[in-house]
Image: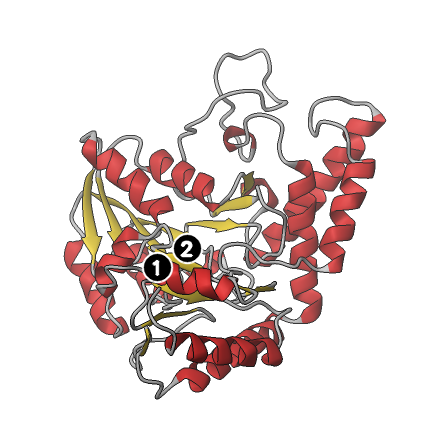
């Protein structure tokens, strides 16, 4: 099987990540921050080392770097935590359900008022869309850095600047951008949420929340933290306040190793390779009758391509391609707002390469998409 579903989870993982997971299972069997014996101390040191690596990579302080279950967990903590006292919340029309659903749930309970900023291929129109929605009670803006459906890059630096000018918390979903682009909190982001298992090449069950500390995040989960054990109240200090329960030590170690792989390989080199594969895929299908590629020349894109084949719904196309050895994601990609914005009522097929894919694999996929187009609809 050839995996082109790396926007969901990167696979295969780098050798360094596989080795880190094996070493963690072998050596880090203690409970970090919960004991003074050698096994607990060794495990605590491994967790802190991974925390330092992630913090440095994104320009955060280690204590403001929180390990989570995934990006969904991080976004829920950020959105519900920042909006715990109510107010006005703005999200983009390209948000993943990880951001859209907690925002909608808060609005449905009348805990917040919610607005959706329309995203356009033209960055200027998108920025104006956010600007027009800002009110005196706007507390936070949530925006994906890159769409998980089409890969469209949103003007997050400009949106961050707008939020700074207005004193609004900017919560960024970096799931499809982190590890591919040099994302830093200093780019106007107050809270960055991302997955550990996608562009950072860690294992599944990993995510990160990084904050500049400017906006308090009320915990949505309370429990054991290894600190302030005599108090019935959750500690206020980070990362403890947001890391209840035993953390995923093995996962955190692999995220650290994944970041190390990106740094040694070179982020620019990695991104150039994936962009080259996307260009090869698009050029191979351009001009082919009955194939729609969802890209607009006015927009910029991360290395993700959504497409459809006339005569097949997206699930049928992906299923037939899977039968030929290709893994691609079809349907609505957990992003109802994005598909409503695109007008793709039947969803799309998504091509998402990684650094481990080759040009020959892309050529094989192009050939199979073209031959699939000539089949009768099953």
- The residue identified by callout 2 is 189
Residue depicted at x 70% and y 45%: 253
Q: Which of 363 and 251 is in front in this view?
A: 363
Q: In this view, does 260 lie above or below 80?
A: below
Left or right of residue 63: residue 116: left
Q: Is mark 2 on a helix, strand or loop?
A: loop
The percent coordinates of residue 370 (x first, y second) are: 43, 80
Colour scheme of the rendered structure: secondary structure
Q: In this view, does 199 lie above or below 74?
A: below
The percent coordinates of residue 228 (x first, y second) are: 58, 18
Q: Nearer the viewer, residue 270 or 310?
A: 310
Tell me whether the residue at label 1 lies in contact with that at label 2, contact meaning CB atoms closer than 8 angstroms.
yes
The residues tagged by marks 1 and 2 sit, at their Cα atoms, a distance apart of 6 Å
- The residue identified by callout 1 is 160
Quarter of the picture containing the C terminus is bottom left
Q: What element carries label 1?
A: helix
Residue depicted at x 38% and y 74%: 375
How many numbered marks, from 0 up? 2
Q: Is residue 351 above or below residue 66?
A: below
The label on residue 219 is: none
């Amino acid at each position: 099987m050839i995996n082109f579903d790396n926007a969901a989870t990167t696979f295969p993982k780098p050798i360094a990540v596989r080795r880190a997971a094996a070493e963690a299972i072998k050596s880090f069997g203690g409970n970090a921050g919960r004991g003074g014996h050698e096994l607990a101390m060794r495990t605590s040191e491994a967790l802190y080392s991974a925390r330092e690596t992630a913090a440095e990579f994104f320009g955060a302080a280690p204590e403001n770097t929180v390990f989570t279950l995934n990006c969904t967990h991080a976004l829920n903590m950020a959105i519900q935590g920042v909006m715990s006292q109510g107010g006005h919340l703005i999200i983009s029309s390209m948000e993943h359900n990880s951001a859209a659903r907690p925002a909608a749930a808060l609005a449905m309970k009348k805990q917040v008022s919610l607005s959706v900023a329309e995203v356009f291929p033209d960055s200027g129109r998108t920025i104006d869309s956010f600007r027009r929605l800002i009110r005196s009670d706007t507390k936070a803006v949530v925006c994906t850095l890159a769409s998980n459906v089409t890969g469209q890059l949103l003007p997050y630096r400009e949106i961050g600047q707008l939020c700074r000018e207005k004193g609004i918390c900017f919560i960024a979903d970096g799931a499809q951008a982190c590890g591919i682009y040099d994302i830093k909190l200093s780019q106007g982001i107050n809270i960055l949420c991302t997955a550990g298992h996608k562009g950072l090449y860690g294992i599944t069950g990993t995510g990160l929340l990084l904050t500049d500390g400017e906006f308090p995040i009320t915990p949505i989960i309370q429990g054991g933290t290894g600190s302030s054990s005599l108090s019935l109240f959750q500690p206020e200090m980070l990362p403890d306040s947001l890391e209840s329960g035993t953390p995923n030590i093995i996962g955190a170690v692999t995220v650290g190793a994944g970041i190390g792989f990106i740094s040694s390989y070179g982020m620019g080199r990695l991104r150039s390779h994936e962009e080259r594969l996307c260009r090869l895929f698009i050029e191979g299908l351009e001009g082919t009758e009955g194939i729609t590629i969802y890209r607009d020349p006015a927009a910029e894109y991360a290395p993700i391509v959504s497409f459809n084949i006339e005569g097949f719904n997206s699930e049928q196309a992906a299923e037939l391609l899977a039968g030929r050895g290709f893994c691609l994601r079809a349907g609505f990609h957990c992003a109802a707002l994005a598909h409503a914005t695109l007008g793709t009522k039947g969803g799309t097929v998504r091509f998402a390469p990684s650094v481990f894919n080759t040009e020959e694999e892309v050529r094989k996929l192009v050939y199979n998409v073209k031959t699939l187009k000539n089949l009768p609809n099953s």
